[in-house]
Amino acid sequence: MLKKHNQLFLTIMLVVDIGAVIFSWVFSYHFRFDFGLFSMPKGVPPLSQYLYFTPAVVIIWAVSMRLGGLYVPMRSDSRFNEYFRIFKTSTIAAVITMAAAFSFRGYSYSRLAMALFWIFSNISLVVSHAVTRAILREMRRRGRNLRYILIVGAGDLGQALAETFSRHPESGMIVKGILSDDPNDVGRKYHGYEVIGVIDNVKRLIHEHKVDQIFIALPHSAYDRLENTLNLLGEETVDIKLAPDILQFIQLNTSVEDFDGFPIISLSESPMYGWNVVLKRAFDIILSLCFIIIWSPVMLIISALVKLGTKGPLFYKQERMSLGGEPFTIYKFRSMEMDAEKKTGAVWASSDDNRRTGIGQFLRKTSLDELPQLFNVLKGNMSLVGPRPERPVFVENFKKSVPMYMLRHKMKAGITGWAQVNGWRGDTSLDKRIEYDLYYIENWSMSFDIKILWLTIWKGFINKHAY
């Protein structure tokens, strides 16, 4: 919606970015060959050779930046997320540019110049976006590039919509007021926005407040008013938006798609699709390998202590559930006596659990027994960050008693997670753990994963709820 009303701004941003890319392309040539900082065994090629290839660079980068999601209206996500998209897009575009340049007949392009081009393009695009966004904010502060809105409906749906607008002042969409069916609501405020009249006065209020858009947010029980409201707006030129009353059905990552002209509302879906899957998997593989190498001396010491301390296998294997509810075998250093559940059956560990071995008590308290899960991550059963994996026997119980419990399986299970770094682990509130898990899935991003990993390291491995 915001994107549709910002086509001019987005086009200008694309043009500015293309200018930044061209500058980076030419500057990388001069930095490589004119500043005398690097040796030039093959001599200095003419600038015209690089200028001749510039149209191809423009096409490659324009398409890559357009498909890379660089041109979306400002939302609540952090600047880090935007800069990460720039890095990802520029890296892909630079690789394509290098492949095209090195296959270009008749010319030879410097690999160092190409590397410099990638560096300068990242810097120039970050600067370009930061400056353009700052200009947009200043324009809106001065009252330009704004949209004036009325919300029709003062019920739960209208109030939820008002709250959403209040959280996004950067959108440039100004709510002039809310209209209600009940005259007694007039004068009340919801999230800072006043009920300025009743729905029957919508035509007069549109002209009084110079409104551009109407958002109809009526509950199911008032949908008989929808036709009357549309009839009242029949002679007006304002844009009309309908917010469907589906709040009670929304579960996770709700979105609206167009299927050959037919609107489809997705009530629950995983954020793991497209590039998200590739990036998260690459992130897991690289870091799990690094962690395995770093922690290998510690794992060798733990292995020796476990084998010397008690009889039995080194590793404990157990069935858990991950993405899509698929079972997998999780690995841990064995921290309990053999056949620990032979008498008790499947139970959670407690603070006074006498099944733990001597070294096992230390391993569980420090979470070092979970280091072998790095191999689960490497295999693809788990992720470094995600909801904690649970045993199928417990899942069967929880899914019947805990609302939306199964939605946590929309993401691959993780060694650490948002619930864990906030203390919701072990013998703590299950409802709170689910709340934090669903928040993580709803707001997932690579920067969020990095934040959770950092908090895991910063807060340490010792957890008072880990038994």
Image (cartoon, helix red, strand yellow):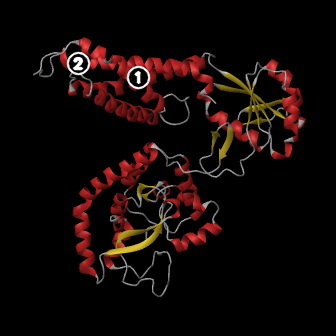
Q: Which residue is mark 2?
A: 31
22 or 462: nearer the viewer: 22
Left or right of 260 on screen, residue 207: right
Q: Quadrant of the N terminus?
A: top right
- Judge whether 465 appears above or below 222 on screen: below
- Judge whether 217 appears above or below 237 on screen: below
Amino acid type of disc 1? Answer: Ile
Left or right of 7 on screen, residue 228: right
385 or 237: nearer the viewer: 237
The percent position of residue 328, horizontal first and vertical second, equals: 44, 67
- Sequence-first tag of 1 and 2: 2
The percent position of residue 370, horizontal first and vertical second, equals: 36, 66
- Judge whether 74 appears above or below 444 on screen: above
The percent position of residue 407, horizontal first and vertical second, equals: 58, 58
Amino acid type of disc 2? Answer: Phe
For residue 236, which quarter of the picture?
A: top right
Is residue 198 among what the camera can see? Answer: no
Q: Which residue is mark 1?
A: 59
Q: Quadrant of the C terminus?
A: bottom left
Q: Which residue extends farthest bottom?
A: 343
Q: Element type at marker 1?
A: helix
The residue under the point 32% across, 78% down is 358
> Is the C-beta separation of discs 1 and 2 under 8 Å?
no
